[in-house]
Amino acid sequence: MPSLAIIILIAFVPILYTFWLSLHSLNLKSPLATSNFIGLSNYILLLKDFRMWRALWQTLCFTVTSVSCELVFGLILALILNMTFKLRGICRASILIPWAIPTVVSALLWTWIFNDQYGVFNDILNKIGIIKVYKSWLGVPSLAFFSIIIAEVWKTTPFVALMLLAGLQMIPKDLYEAARIDGASRLRQFQFITLPLLKPIILVALLFRTLDAFRVFDLIYVMTAGGPGNSTEVLSLYTYKTLFSYLDFGYGCALSFVTFAVAGLISIFYILLLKSEI
Amino acid sequence: MRPYLFILIFLALIVGCGPPNKVGKEQITWAVGKDATGAQGELIKLFESKYPAYKVNMIEMPESASTQHDSYVTYLSTADSSIDIYTIDVIWPAEFAAAEWIIPLDDYFGPIKETDFLKGPIDACIYQGKLYAIPWFTDAGVLYYRKDILREEKLTPPRTWQELIDQAMKLQEKYKVHGFVFQAQQYEGLICNFLEYVWGNGGSIEYNGKFDIANPRARQALQFMVDIIHKYEIAPEGVITYKEEESRQIFTSGRAAFHRNWPYVWAIAQNEAKGSMVKDKVGIIPMVHNAGCKSSSVLGGWNLAISKYSKNKQAAWKFIEFLSSYEAQKLYAIKGGRLPTRKDVYQDEEVLRFAPHYRDFYQVFINARPRPVSPYYSQISDLLQIELHQALTLRKTVEEALIDASKKIEEVVRQQVP
């Protein structure tokens, strides 16, 4: 019971309060008009808000692209680290470094890597001969999106890899032995043993990563602040600006409630998938 | 039992960690942006030695203005009384005053004369006829150029847009440098740069107190910005990712011929220890303008305001009075390299010895124009930044971007009228 009370206190109360605020017109800059109840007006405004739809679309693009890349690379990494080879311990520990660096720091690192004047990324591509002139990676809408995804994938792939590695180690070795005796190829072993048995873990990893990626903030705040031309503005960034820069708490709360609702839908979707698995 | 014990210990920690109270001294708490020069500490020391009855606690805020804004909002929206004096950007007084977070200072202002200060900074502190903050130091956009290269080419520093383009193209080719670097990241600095071209084109974005963004002169100004990046290519494409420091580094490492920035670059450019490759090779001139128009700089700077929730307003005022005094402004000009807001400090021999260009630049500083004063400024600025950036990245034409901006801004203004 006490745990339930704590959960209610720290999770449900703020959520309900946010929803309650979102039904008001509350802008800190006009204290005279404080807290008028306006029903669902903020949500009706939201539906007509092109900027919100664009931010939502960009958030979804970001989430889908980065999470699928992370899954593919994470799986490859996990499979490699599950094999026996020399210095495996060091390798396992060292892949965690990107994950251990605070996001703000890694975001700054990548900002420098992608710098148009002295960035390593430009230098490498130039030396290989892919580009002739240094590019402004964070200054062109499509490239900026791509650059941010690279930074995100670099940082969070280790997390996926680690989870999958744990999953791989739970698969009994005898299954592979039996399969080998039956003459199954490596590929078929992967297809019929590894993948099915790993599926629940994959789903859990996806759940975590999708929710995290959907709420991405710090990485983009540091790298582009939503630019160029708002092409990388995600939902949480728009919410933040509305709350802290526009001081429009009513509308800002409506935005965060939408974020919450979409995140909720995502988790319900995954949980249902997981249930059908077990 | 144990949870209670835990809570008790926690409470004890919170209480115990508070600032130590020096008995008998009046405490003043001052929130101010981080300053690497250390001059702020000297100011406090001087104040405390002059007025031993007071003790000033400085709360250092992050350097970035927008981060400061957001943390102040957190303090003030929760009616926090722990901070007495806020150091606020030149564009915030209207917003903070409209939210009733800071108090009018007209009653306190008595002993100081408004006319002792530069007019622009004072105007920026006035909201609905009342003075809400005292200008502490000021800023104005200026154009830096490479004296050595221009001398070699026998060029006189540019005054008009066309001269800047011609010279930059020529130097870029010959000296393998970037022609011109400035700030065009999607942030407040972009507005500053944009306004200097609009004003330098004889235009404005407000007429009679109403916003008018899509007027022909503003269009020409934005077109000029687009052209120097994409048509004449005198600015690197990456300029749309630069804030002050990114562009400054290019200039002080000797890789640009012209550079628009605030006056702080001067001190860094003269300092080889800070990595400057252009010591004694830099000149400063007023911002360029379109032929037939007048040069104009955007007004920057920081002001001191008293929190409505302060329990110590009288003491807070004492400290503000000190910070805006001749003595303190002189100290901060020399030790901190900041432009004074008092007119007479510009005549001071010692200050002029440290920064000889103050004499010539007095006119620029005195003519610097404030950005629009509105409690909705930060929102309006944000919307404009987005549209300007769309034009600078060629996703919209100049016309489209400015018309879209003016539509969105009109909507904001309409909502604000009850």
Image (spheres, rainbow, N blue to C red):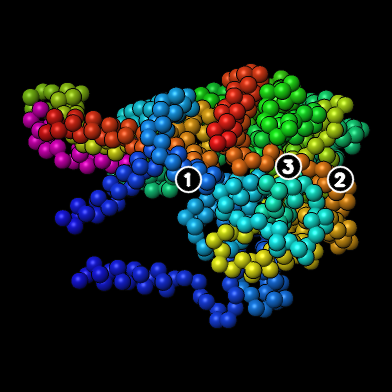
Q: Where does the image place residue B96, in percent across and percent down from the top left? A: 59, 49
Subunit under mark 2: B
Q: Where does the image place residue B252, in percent across and percent down from the top left? A: 73, 44
Asked if residue B392 shows in the view, the reply is: yes
Q: Earlier in the sequence, mark 3 or mark 2?
A: 2
Looking at numbered disc 3 in the image, what kind of residue is underneath it? Pro
The reply to whether the magenta stretch includes residue A169 is: yes
Q: Would you identify the image quadrant in which residue B308 lies? A: bottom right
Check the image and report above or below for B119 versus A272. Answer: below
Element at label 1: loop
Subunit under mark 1: A
Residue assigned mark 2: B363
Quarter holding the N terminus of chain B is bottom left
User: Which mark is nearer the camera, 2 or 1?
Assistant: 1
Magenta-drawn segment: A157-179
Callout 3 and callout 1 share a chain: no
The reply to whether the magenta stretch includes residue B279 is: no
Element at label 3: loop
Subunit under mark 3: B
